[in-house]
């Protein structure tokens, strides 16, 4: 991990994030109590960001030129659909390593629970470990293997599903198949979720609560195209299945905040829309606006300034940074700098990322209803979302079949609703790295600087780290 000089940092409002940094106990410490296992599970989440490379590879990025921009390999190579050799924060390799580091914490905790004299006392910790292990493997198989397809998953190479603590320097692993990995994810998820107890957490938003675990289940089953299960788990995220009241209040709250206030709120544990947060070593908050390849004026206007299918525009405070008017930033991320010592001018920059949100659950439910033919229910969710993002929203802004046909040029209601869903999600999750998941699932082509990444291009799979060849793993094809 690189250390960074504080002289290059923006001044941060507030601070106070240090308390969320939960450290694993010393490796010599015996995991012989519920408290010690719970402390270890504070590290059971990938403390790394994927937004840096997934945003650059997606159609959220364009070339802003050299003036006033930052050029780093972790931003440049994904944009050009090239493998990233850099191993530092924001790279695919860094994310891979931190996923398996999180998995190792899960496995260490599960082993300690199994050996405990009273394993029943650790039920909640077992649940968290299993769901967290499932999540880390899900993210790995999503980013480094082919997207799940029931007709090919039994042949497509997956990623190693690790369930035992490592006790040798170099252990041989198999990638097995995407189908196998999905089977193991589902087993861990469905076994662990019922065991979770929200009262076992000191800071619940940084752990898999029942709400966050159910949100994860909606994403997993959406990828698997088991739409009935998406609906079932979505109903469990909030009491009474009420998602709308937990969405971000863009009209009544966010558009009235100062920049500092918006940055403080978006990834705050007090924001009801945030279901799971992680704090990761990352320079994303510092550089996201000024990376050479990123959100550019043309896309800002297409998404936020021109009218969408509702006939209105989104409430979306936007800022550009520095002298380059193409350096656009949505106020979501602020950097938290942790000094290496009290008087040091070096340390590690951290960024808080929302891993699951109420908005994603709403969208997942809407998509499931679209494919189940429940168009009215899907429209209701999409209209509920729009009501939170349109100032002065009225019934005239509601999505209708006529609006779908006029805006998207299709009389197929399902197609029009899918286009609407994908457009809404792109606007909502801009600069969070989430667009890449829809690009994968829908095989959306991406064109950067004249080169197109087709729907089945092998470069859509990020490359495994070179080091894993020592463990017998084959690289992704190029």
Image (spheres, rainbow, N blue to C red):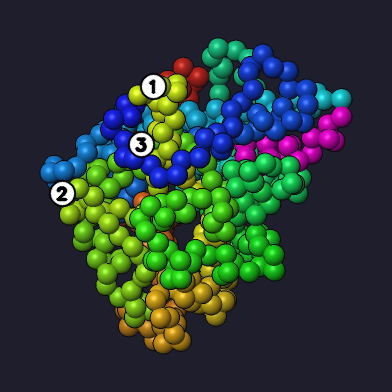
Q: Is residue 356 left or right of residue 235?
A: left
Q: Quadrant of residue 70 in the image?
A: top left
The numbered disc on residue 344 is 1
* x then y, percent, for residue 192: 72, 43
Q: Nearer the viewer, mark 3 or mark 1?
A: 1
Considering only vertical position in the picture, is 461 above or below 330?
above
Of callouts 2 and 1, the N-terminal one: 2
Q: Quadrant of residue 243 in the image?
A: bottom right
- Residue 172 seen anywhere in this rendered image of the structure: yes
Q: Nearer the viewer, residue 374 or 126?
A: 126
**SS at badge 2:** loop
**SS at badge 1:** loop
Q: Nearer the viewer, residue 26 or 208?
A: 26
Residue name at image x 20 percent, y 48 percent: 322
Considering only vertical position in the picture, is 406 above or below 138?
below
Residue name at image x 34 percent, y 78 percent: 312
Of callouts 3 and 2, the N-terminal one: 3
Q: CA distance from mark 3 to mark 2?
A: 20 Å
Q: Which residue is mark 2?
A: 323
Q: Nearer the viewer, mark 3 or mark 2?
A: 2
Q: Which residue is mark 3?
A: 283
């Amino acid at each position: 991990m690189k250390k960074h000089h504080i002289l290059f940092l923006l001044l941060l409002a507030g601070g106070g994030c240090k308390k969320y940094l939960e450290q694993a106990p010393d490796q010599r410490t015996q995991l012989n109590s519920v408290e010690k296992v719970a402390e270890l599970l504070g590290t059971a989440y990938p403390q790394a960001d994927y937004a840096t490379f997934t945003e650059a590879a997606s159609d959220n990025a364009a070339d802003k030129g050299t003036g006033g921009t930052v050029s780093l390999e972790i931003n440049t190579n994904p944009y050009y659909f090239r493998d990233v050799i850099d191993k530092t924060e924001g790279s695919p390799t860094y994310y891979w390593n931190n996923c398996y580091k999180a998995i190792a914490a899960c496995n260490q905790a599960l082993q300690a629970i199994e050996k405990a004299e009273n394993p029943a006392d650790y039920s909640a910790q077992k649940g968290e470990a299993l769901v967290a292990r499932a999540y880390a493997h899900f993210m790995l198989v999503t980013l480094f293997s082919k997207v799940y397809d029931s007709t090919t998953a039994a042949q497509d190479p997956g990623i190693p599903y690790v369930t035992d603590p490592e006790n040798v320097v170099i252990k041989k692993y198999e990638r097995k198949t995407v189908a196998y990995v999905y089977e193991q994810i589902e087993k861990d998820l469905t076994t662990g979720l019922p065991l979770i107890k929200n009262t076992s957490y000191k800071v619940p938003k940084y752990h898999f609560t029942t709400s966050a675990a159910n949100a994860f289940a909606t994403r997993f089953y959406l990828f698997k195209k088991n739409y009935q299960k998406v609906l079932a788990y979505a109903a469990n995220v909030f009491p009474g299945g009420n998602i709308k009241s937990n969405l971000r209040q863009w009209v009544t709250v966010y558009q009235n905040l100062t920049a500092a206030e918006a940055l403080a709120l978006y990834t705050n544990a007090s924001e009801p829309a945030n279901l799971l947060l992680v704090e990761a070593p990352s320079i994303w908050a510092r550089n996201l606006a000024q990376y050479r390849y990123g959100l550019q004026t043309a896309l800002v206007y297409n998404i936020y300034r021109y009218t969408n299918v509702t006939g209105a525009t989104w409430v979306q405070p936007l800022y550009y940074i520095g002298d380059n008017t193409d350096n656009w930033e949505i106020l979501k991320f602020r950097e938290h700098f942790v000094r290496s010592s009290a008087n040091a001018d070096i340390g590690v920059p951290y960024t808080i990322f929302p891993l699951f949100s109420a908005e994603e659950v709403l969208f997942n439910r809407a998509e499931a209803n679209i494919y189940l033919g429940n168009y009215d229910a899907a429209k209701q969710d999409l209209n509920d979302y729009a009501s939170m993002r349109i100032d002065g929203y009225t019934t005239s802004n509601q999505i209708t079949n006529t609006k779908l046909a006029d805006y998207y040029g299709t009389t197929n209601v399902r197609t029009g609703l899918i286009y609407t869903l994908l457009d809404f999600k792109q606007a909502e999750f801009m600069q969070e790295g989430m667009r890449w998941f829809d690009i994968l699932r829908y095989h959306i082509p991406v064109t950067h600087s004249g080169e197109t990444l087709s729907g089945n291009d092998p470069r859509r799979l990020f490359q495994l780290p070179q080091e894993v060849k020592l463990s017998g793993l084959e690289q992704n094809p190029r």
